[in-house]
Structure formats: structure tokens, C-alpha cells
Amino acid sequence: MNESPAAFIVQARMASDVGCVRRANEDSIAFVRPQDADLRQRLGVLAVVADGMGGHRAGEVASALAVETICHAYFASPADQDPLRALKLAVREANSAIHRAGLADRALAGMGTTATALVVMSTAVLFAHVGDSRLYRCTGGCCRQLTDDHTLVEQMVRDGLISVQEARQHPMRSMLLRSLGTSPGVRVAAQRCAAPAVGESFVLSSDGLHESVEAADIAEIVASLAPEAACRQLIELARERDGSDNISVGVIAIQPADSAGEG
């Protein structure tokens, strides 16, 4: 999957694995590169990771609905709308769609999902985020987390009640404060970041990856491997270290324009 602005292309790979314990994969992933050149120039390329929750496979329904709605709504936004606002509204539309589906079907009641959406444009990087999936920006062998986890334990860290080290082992570390679909409205974290630069990589992950794979490990792997191989190795590492949850990852690499023939 390649995108070709003037100075770089985007190489992207997304992968998801059920892990070593669960029978079903409730994560959903997507990467969209519009075929229409004008649309691609205006809105860039989009990658999404969602991690669903709910009984009777409702989490699988919630995450799939989130990804489908975000992708469709973002690229259907009016031509005069700011892309960051369009992305934020797309995530809100996904929240509404999931909430309505949960009300309409008792088997899906209370379902929800995280969602982290990344847009790479020639002039900016955008993201919108709800929950505890993550987005990292990696360069020079270092990864910086762009998103904040919307969890009780992360809030406790921010409030100075526990340390980062204590948070890693806290029994309530997966308790979400925000998710899509569990209520009629949701606060979406959204941000416009500096334009992408050649040599950078962006990594999207569900918590099945980053619960056991540290940012330093992610940085080392994406710096040394192409996106497809990096996704494979990150999933393998997460399975070796834990594997109790579904594992999803996207690696979006910014490459020189003359590497357009690569995968």
C-alpha cells in the first residue's frame, strides 16, 4: 500500500492475531488508500485499530462497526471540511452507530470498543482516539506515544496516586474510562501533529500488543524491518511474552519517494 506525495511514500501493513488464549478475535483493523488522487491529496491515507468488548461476540461486532463507520464517514466528509474535524466527527458517528446497534439488539447490549485512527497527509499527521489502543511516532530508534490511555489506572498515574511502575501491574489497568458505543455521547481526543518526515514510522496497537511489548522494543523492530515483517515480529513477541489477549498492530512507514516499488 503506497501513497506518493512529492517527497515521500507511505508503506503500510496491518495485522491482527487471536493470541494464545481467546477463541475469537474482537479486534478490527483497516488501512484505506483512496484510489481517487484528489481525495487522497485532500484527506490522505487512514489507518484504524479498534479493540471490542462485550459478551456473545458483541465486541467483535462493535470493533468492526467502528472501523467501517470511521473509514466511510471520514472519506465521505464535505470537501470544505477541515480533515481533523472530519476525523473527529467520524469517530463520533461510529459511537452513535454502535450505541444504536446495542439498543436495537439485546444480544449486543452494552457492547463497546476502543478506536485509534491515524491520518497521514503530505502536510500533517492527524489522529483521533478513544480508549486504550495506542498510537506511537517512531524515529531514530525511539518511539513516542502520541495518545493517552483512557483508563482508570492511567488517570491514577496522572493524579499522582500511583507510579508508572505500579500501573503496569495494577489489577484494574484495563478498566476504561472512555469507549465507543457504551453511551450516546463520547469525548474524542483529536490532534493535528507535524507533517511526516522520511524515516519515521507510526505504530498503531491494541493493548494485546503494548501490555507486553515496550515502546523500546517497538522502536527497535520498526527501525530494522519493513512494515510487513515488523508486524509479524511484534505479534510473535507479544504471543511469546503473554498472548492472553487479541493482538493487533499497524506499521505505517514514511519512505523516500524513489522506493515506490517496494511493498
Image (tube, rainbow, N blue to C red):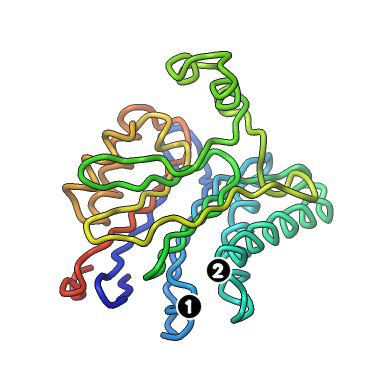
Which residue occupies 59% across, 41% down?
A: 131
Vertical position of residue 132 compared to residue 48: above or below: above
What amino acid is at disc 1? Arg
Judging by the rendered image, the residue that carries numbered circle 1 is 42
Q: Nearer the viewer, residue 114 or 16?
A: 114
Helix, strand or loop under label 1: helix
Dots 2, 1 in contact, CB < 8 A: yes
Vertical position of residue 87 compared to residue 26: above or below: below
What amino acid is at disc 2? Pro
Which callout, 2 or 1, points at the residue further toward the start of the chain?
1
Classify the position of the C terminus by image quarter: bottom left
Residue 205 at x, y = what percent?
43, 45
Q: Nearer the viewer, residue 45 or 12?
A: 45
Figure quadrant of residue 145? top left
Q: Nearer the viewer, residue 34 or 57?
A: 34
Residue 126 at x, y = what percent?
48, 59
Vertical position of residue 173 compared to residue 262: above or below: above
Classify the position of the N terminus by image quarter: bottom left
Relative to residue 97, is residue 223 drawn left or right? Answer: left
Judging by the rendered image, the residue that carries numbered circle 2 is 83
CA gap, disc 2 to disc 1?
8 Å
Residue 78 at x, y = what percent?
63, 79
Residue 114 at x, y = what percent?
59, 45
Using the image, tell me which numbered label, if any, was put on residue 131: none
Helix, strand or loop under label 2: helix
Q: Residues within 10 Å of mark 1 (few under 14, many from 20)?
A: some
Tell me how many marks there are: 2
Which residue occupies 50% across, 19% down?
A: 167
Q: Nearer the viewer, residue 223 or 42?
A: 42
Q: Residues within 10 Å of mark 2 (few under 14, many from 20)?
A: many
Figure quadrant of residue 153? top right
